[in-house]
Image (spheres, grey):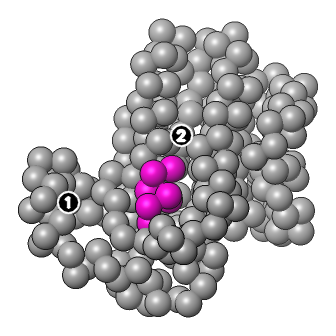
Amino acid sequence: MSMKEKVIVVTGASSGIGAAIAKKAAEKGHHPVLIARSRDKLENVQKEIEKNGKTCSFFQADVTNELEVENVVSFLHESFSSVDVLINNAGVGKFAYVEELTAEETKEMVEVNVLSVFYLVKAVLPSMKKHGGGHIINIGSQAGRLATPKASIYAASKHALIGFSNALRLEVEPYHIFVSTVNPGPVRTPFFQKADPSGSYEKAVEKLLIEPDDLAKKIIRTIEKPKREINIPWWMAGLSKLYGLFPGLVEKAGKKQFQKK
């Protein structure tokens, strides 16, 4: 591997944002390592990348299983000696009122959106520290900055992820490890098939959907030039900031929009 080429680990890389990030990373001359539960989908993404003459690896694993995460990271260190960039992209959501959510759905959101990030970060940190640097990118959500109806647990899990990232950033700064948080609005991915099987929310926000390729480009740019946060779209990021100052006003003014789920 050249000095310029980085090993970029991407979770949830079998489709959507994760697959788009992996493809853009390969285009830039990096070596993406894909992690997800579906072997067939991972193989399809790998084939797409390799047909363009680029390199790619993948591991089938459940990132909510700490032992599987430790095993994958151990294999990674044996193969590449270090992980240059870890992108915690795996995420899941369920849009429903609190009394309609099941314990299983709630547990899954916490395990995928929060605990899996902890497992992966904890596993790669010793190697990053040993090699004098690294970059951890956690994919959050604007929901973690401004919660709305029918997204209580999803918003809570993303809020936790943002808090985790902020504390982690301060902890690892002395070791030249950078931590970025990416907080997008709704993205055109298969995420909505599980979050809202009715399709009503996706249809309601159709004109606002971010394309995965556009988000992936911004994430790859922050690998090349690290940023603390990426918040898109700009107007939603601005609304989140306004909410921090005037929560009551924003809740009242945005009540109709917030009910689109």
* Residue 103 makes an appearance in the image: yes
Which comes before the other along the chain, label 2 or label 1? 2
Q: State the residue lying farthest toward the front.
A: 99
Residue lying at 48% horizontally and 33% vertically, measured from the top left: 164
Q: Is residue 114 left or right of residue 26?
A: left
Residue lying at 59% horizontally and 18% vertically, measured from the top left: 133
- Please tell me whether residue 152 belongs to the stretch shown in magenta: yes
Which percent across, then down, holds residue 167? 44, 25
- Classify 119 as above or below 175: below
Q: Within 10 angstroms of label 2, few (less than 14), some, or many (20 or more) residues?
A: many
Q: Secondary structure at mark 1?
A: helix
Residue 130 picture quarter? top right
Which quarter of the rendered picture does the N terminus lie within? top right
* Residue that numbered label 1 is attached to: 239
Residue lying at 50% horizontally and 59% vertically, measured from the top left: 154
Q: Nearer the viewer, residue 209 or 156?
A: 156
Q: Is residue 179 left or right of residue 87?
A: left
- Please tell me whether residue 78 belongs to the stretch shown in magenta: no
Q: How many marks?
A: 2
Q: Within 10 angstroms of label 1, few (less than 14), some, or many (20 or more) residues?
A: some
Which amino acid lies under the numbered mark 1 shown in the image of this protein? Leu
Magenta part of the chain: 151-157
* Residue that numbered label 2 is attached to: 137
Which quarter of the rendered picture does the C terminus lie within? bottom left
Q: Main secondary structure of the magenta part?
A: helix
* Residue 224 makes an appearance in the image: no
Which amino acid lies under the numbered mark 2 shown in the image of this protein? Ile
| Contact flag, marks 2 and 1 (Cβ < 8 Å) | no
Q: What is the spatial separation of the Cα atoms under label 2 and label 1, in whole angstroms? A: 23 Å
Q: Nearer the viewer, residue 56 or 37?
A: 37
Which percent across, then down, holds residue 15? 69, 67
Q: Nearer the viewer, residue 261 or 171?
A: 261
